[in-house]
Amino acid sequence: MKNDSRLSRMLHVLIHMDQLAGAATSEQIAQMLSTNPVVVRRTLAGLREQGYVRSLKGPGGGWSLARKLEEISLADIHRALDSPRLFAISATVDHAGCLVEQAVNAALSSAFDEAEQALLARLDSISLADVARDFARRARRKSARP
Amino acid sequence: MKNDSRLSRMLHVLIHMDQLAGAATSEQIAQMLSTNPVVVRRTLAGLREQGYVRSLKGPGGGWSLARKLEEISLADIHRALDSPRLFAISATVDHAGCLVEQAVNAALSSAFDEAEQALLARLDSISLADVARDFARRARRKSARP
DNA sequence: GCAATATGTAACTTCCACTGTTGCGTAGGA
DNA sequence: TCCTACGCAACAGTGGAAGTTACATATTGC
């Protein structure tokens, strides 16, 4: 299976947008991400629906933040992307009546559901501002000792 | 992305194998799983390498358990399948030098790595015998109140 | 030895969701 | 009006699990 990189990419973009003065075009963002402007617009559209970013058409237009980084958690962005599948593994339901299958699925589901809840709680506890602060720290460290 | 169902399927099969008296052919197992005998042999081959099952050729041959269910954890089977990717989401590494990307990846990686460790620990704490006992409980409940 | 059974394995095709691309429509600024 | 930038539909590309076909090999039982 191929991996879903939308969450990672969108976080990356949002922090960059915060650093920029004005708006960024999907063309510019696509270059940041080494991808295509259409992919950028497609993915950012979900974030706009949830009010995290704004888009403007025409010259001088582009994308900009609609909220402060402090008010956005990593889990918010995950949800804005329509909560994509977190796990690459899942239970089968080939034989709904098979008690063995039910027992296996119960064991797996409880483990995976728990892991998912813990992970989402963790992502909810991290704001984009936290990440931006970590970025700033890395930038300082780099300029101090290049 | 399509989901990986090998773990779920193999657990299902192993419990069934424990219930059976003799060996099960890949043909029979394929019917249990609604799949193809070749897929079964391909997947069980990994478990055989790790000593969890045995296979015999010729008439009367087939697959059988090489260890007690008590001695096999769910994580053991996951590892015997070569530890497939657990998560459908991953970080990008398009710009190794971008400090924003590094900060984002650090945040995501720590959350995902933690979740993975917790999940694997949980899967390690559950033995196939535990699942078999749950199966037996379900069977009793069903026969008591059909 | 021979026939039947069952695994072992290579070499495909199929399937699915994210990703990438092209093309065209629409809105806004100068 | 022209240029810019987003909006969106409709594809093709991609990677890995799953499915399929074909054939080789080993074992049992006669």
Image (tube, coloured by chain):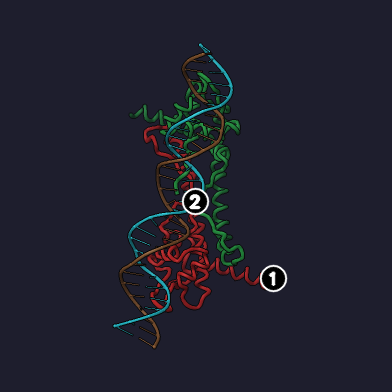
Chain colours: A green, B red, C cyan, D brown
Q: Would you place residue B43 above or below residue A20 in this image?
A: below
In the displayed orientation, state which residue is furthest to the right.
Answer: B145
Residue A117, given in percent of the width and then of the height, sits at 57, 48
Disc 1 target residue: B146
Q: Nearer the viewer, residue B61 or B78?
A: B61
Q: Are marks 1 and 2 on the same chain?
A: yes
First in sequence: mark 1 vs mark 2: 2
Q: Would you place residue B62 above or below residue A21 in this image?
A: below
Q: Nearer the viewer, residue B110 or B20?
A: B20
Whether the residues at callouts 1 and 2 have beta carbons within 8 Å, the answer is no
Q: Nearer the viewer, residue A47 or C3?
A: C3
Residue flagged by tag 2: what amino acid is it?
Lys
Is residue A14 something one can see in this rendering? yes
Q: Nearer the viewer, residue A70 or D23?
A: D23
Q: CA distance from mark 1 to mark 2?
A: 36 Å
Location of the C terminus of chain B by quadrant is: bottom right
Alpha-carbon neighbours of circle 2 within 10 Å: few (<14), some, or many (≥20)? few
Residue B7, given in percent of the width and then of the height, sits at 48, 60
Question: Which chain contains the residue that carries disc 1?
Answer: B
Residue B120, given in percent of the width and then of the height, sits at 48, 55
Q: Would you place residue B38 above or below residue A54 in this image?
A: below
Question: Which chain contains the residue that carries disc 2?
Answer: B
Disc 2 target residue: B2
